[in-house]
Image (spheres, rainbow, N blue to C red):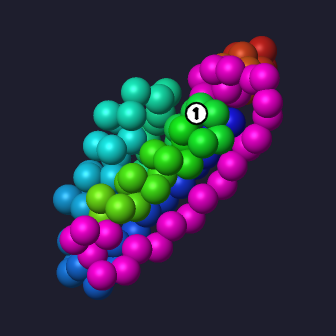
Amino acid sequence: MLIAFSITPLGAGDSVGDLVAEAVRVVRESGLPNRTDAMFTTIEGEWDEVMAVVKRAVDAVAQQAPRVSVVLKADVRPGVTDALTEKVARIEARLAEG
C-alpha cells in the first residue's frame, strides 16, 4: 500500500520546519520506500508497518508540539509492489509518447 501523509505541528510557534524534519527523519530511518515533496511524504509497505511509521512520526512531533494535525491518503492494493515509482513511471511514459 501507499500512504501519503502530512503532519502539521500546531501551537509550536511560527516556524515548524525542525519538527517536520523530525517526522521525515522517522520515515527515512524506517527503511521503507519513501518520497517527500512540498506537501506530503509517501511511504510504501504493508498496512501495519506503514501505519506504525506514521504513528512514530506523529509521536516524534507530539513530543515538542501540544497538538498535531495529520492528513492521510491511502492506496490499498494487495499484491502490488514498487507502486511508489511505477505509478509515476507509467505517467512519464505516456507523456513521452506525446
- The answer to which image quadrant residue 75 occupies is top right
- Front residue of 53/40: it is 53
Q: Residue at x 20, y 59 (%)?
A: 18
Q: Is residue 46 left or right of residue 20?
A: right
Q: Residue at x 67, y 26 (%)?
A: 83
For residue 44, above or below residue 48: above
- The answer to which image quadrant residue 20 occupies is bottom left
Residue 72 is situated, as x and y percent measured from the top left of the image, at: 60, 59
The magenta stretch spans which residues?
Answer: 62-87
Q: Give the residue number, with chain letter if any, for mark 1.
A: 44
Q: Secondary structure at mark 1?
A: strand
- The answer to which image quadrant residue 90 occupies is top right
Q: Is residue 68 magenta?
A: yes
Looking at the rendered image, the quarter that the C terminus falls into is top right
Q: Is residue 81 left or right of residue 38?
A: right
Q: Residue at x 30, y 64 (%)?
A: 61
Q: Residue at x 40, y 69 (%)?
A: 8
Q: Is residue 60 magenta?
A: no
Residue 58 is situated, as x and y percent measured from the top left of the image, at: 40, 61
